[in-house]
Amino acid sequence: MSSESKIPVSTYFGAMTFDQKAMRARLPKEVFTALQGTIKAGKKITEEIAGVVAHGMKEWAMEKGATHYTHWFQPMTGSTAEKHDAFLSIDRDGTPIERFSGEQLIQGEPDASSFPSGGMRTTFEARGYTAWDPSSPAFLMKGGKDLTLCIPTVFISYNGEALDAKTPLLRSMDAVSKSSIRLLETLGVSGVSRVKTFAGCEQEYFLIDRKYYTERPDLVMCGRTLLGALPPKGQQLEDHYFGSIPDRVLEFMQDVEHELYLLGIPAKTRHNEVAPHQFEIAPIFEEANIAVDHNLLVMEVMKKIAEKKGFALLLAEKPFAGINGSGKHNNWSIGTDTGINLLDPGDTPEKNIQFLVFLVAVLGGIYKRADILRMSIASMGNDHRLGANEAPPAVVTVFLGELLERVLDAIESGKVDLKTEKQVLNLGLAQVPEVNKDYTDRNRTSPFAFTGNKFEFRAVGSSQAASVPNMVLNTLMAESVDQMADAILAKIKAGKERDSAILETLREQITATKAIRYQGDNYSEALQQYAKDNGLPNLKNTPQSLRVLLKKDVQDVFIKYGVLTAEETNSRLHIRLERYVKGIDIEARTLQLMLKTFVIPDVSEYQGDIGSSFNNLLAAAEAIGLSDKAIKSQADHLKKLAENLSTLIDLTGEFDEAVEKLETLDSEFDKADYCADVLLPFMVKVREVSDRLELMVDRSRWQLPTYSEMLFEH
Ligand code: ADP
Ligand code: MG
């Protein structure tokens, strides 16, 4: 580790980013001021200053040792992409020179045809443009021997359509800001020019020894195990959680954190998770677009350092069947540019009302748009985790905690008018943060829990980019906030006093959205019944969830808030369906390969061993005086093995046919449904037989690393 780790983090935090400090040092004062203005207003930078900024950025990057630059962006595949170009160019007279122009800074031209557009572009206009998002600082990333200047960008088509996941997120942040300012004004709060959304992503992951990883085609190809018998220990004892972190892992974490600090990413907590070899890293929250960028970088940096340290990083939601899966708790809140967290209950009547209005707006948004929120976290990997009795279920409900429940009930029943200090104290709102800190941890089963001054969306998948869930949260919030403002204004217009108008609106909304509040155990059968009785969406898998995007009112809300055009929504639907089908196709083919080249040959060989040993035994039986009963026991043992192997061979044949059938289906939805309804259950069925055989076969004959080895050996 470098010597920097011995000095305080604050002295080198962000040293590899072209942050405020670097910009101030490198840019002429008027350009720096103009750029800050642009960033604050959430605008694109102008051509006039781009050249100067690019020059300053290049000089800074080259001094640190960078030779190349790249526009770093989030294609709709849910990860990040980059294409590197050298600063080097050759002058007209043949002299080599390092160049980086304003044009290169604000607009790159990746060959967009290699990224999915979901049908938005025809081939003759296959070009996409990447433009710097100045709210996210450029950074230097280590790769190979060198540093590369990475410029966070949005990715748009020739016609201005969003080809990435970031553009819609930025648009949704604008939408929620606009609506919230209007609601604040309705409440009598002025002087706010921007309402920001914040996110903090707690990232769970597994680390296993790299040698096991490379010996398992399923981990290499799919990121999760498709076969593997449960170890005798499992996680029944749960002794891992908050236990001491093994030294080798701790070193990994320290290296990761060091690199994250250089990149200006405020990594804060690290700990063991419930399952063996499972861990978590959480940063301090930031504005949502930055938090999303940073979470993507956290995943990237962890992957790189894991490799260096001889580990494999598993980000899949459910890498091991029967063992706890991984999620990404997306902590989310909204607040003003004047520093007020709108989800923080205050200690005066005014602040309390403001808090309650925004809290109830969240309830309204989730209630009305639970299906879109469910859709936002649907993925092949997350389907294995959601509702697996360890992760939030597919039904979205909100957990508020006992105290807030009482407060809302009191308002609904008309027992309070919230106007007097005394009433507020009686409600105990000032205690909410403390109470919730203790209380909500006890309801880990809720997918969407209020935790003192923020909501924690726990259903997000560990491997997912957080852009889509945050984009959806912001959009549903923008809509709900608008409806609150409309309702209050309508009552004022009808002659009500402002306070009564607010209280009445609160009361109406609390009643109307009651069904979304669920304080019980979300893993229980009772929730399923509750969802049914209350008409809450219960979308079991990805194809069902993605169908939400076909609904007109869903497309309309994205259009209304300028987040996604109908075309952009459709393109996302197609890309995600296609990814789902491709992903399961790859899993199915990997399983075929493993059955045919690992499991069946291994079991056959072992069967041969005990077959010959049985024959030898028969030949010697009389001489050694072996009883018929003893011979039968051995015969039964062999028979059981042979029968299971035959079943596996038969099932493999049937599975081959089932996999081939996928190709013959017409529509993408037919294919996706077939994957969910036929292929996945089939994979489970085949796996059961294989796992049974694993426990019958001599370990030295079994080529695949076992669960016990991967999870219990350090
Ligand atoms: P937990 O009890 O879930 O561990 P923490 O207080 O440790 O809660 O916070 C978890 C995550 O939530 C961290 O990333 C933290 O920065 C983030 N967080 C805290 N406050 C807010 C907020 N107001 N808005 C968004 N995220 C927040
Ligand atoms: Mg948490």
Image (spheres, rainbow, N blue to C red):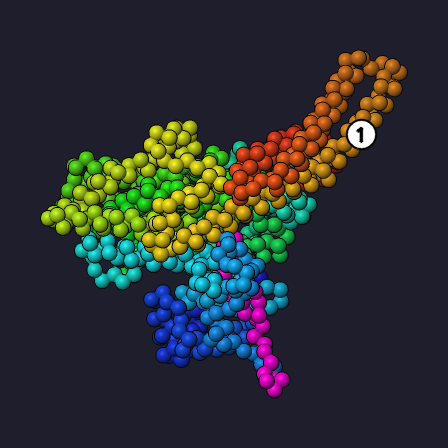
Q: Is residue 4 left or right of residue 639?
A: left
Give the camera-side residue of 505 and 620: 505
Residue lying at 49% horizontally and 41% vertically, measured from the top left: 542
- The three-letter code of the residue at mark 1 reads Gly
- Quick check: can you spot residue 691? no
x, y percentage for residue 58? 51, 75
Give the camera-side residue of 477 and 110: 110
Is residue 71 one of those drawn in magenta?
A: yes
x, y percentage for residue 464? 49, 49
- Quick check: can you spot residue 370? yes
Relative height, residue 602 to residue 178 (above, below):
above
Q: Which residues are magenta?
A: 67-95
Residue lying at 18% horizontally and 51% vertically, measured from the top left: 489
Q: Is residue 609 left or right of residue 486?
A: right
Relative height, residue 525 to residue 11 (above, below):
above
Give the camera-side residue of 101 and 618: 101
Is residue 54 one of those drawn in magenta?
A: no
Disc 1 designates what residue? 608
x, y percentage for residue 706? 66, 38
x, y percentage for residue 564? 40, 54
- Is label 1 in a helix, a strand or a loop? helix
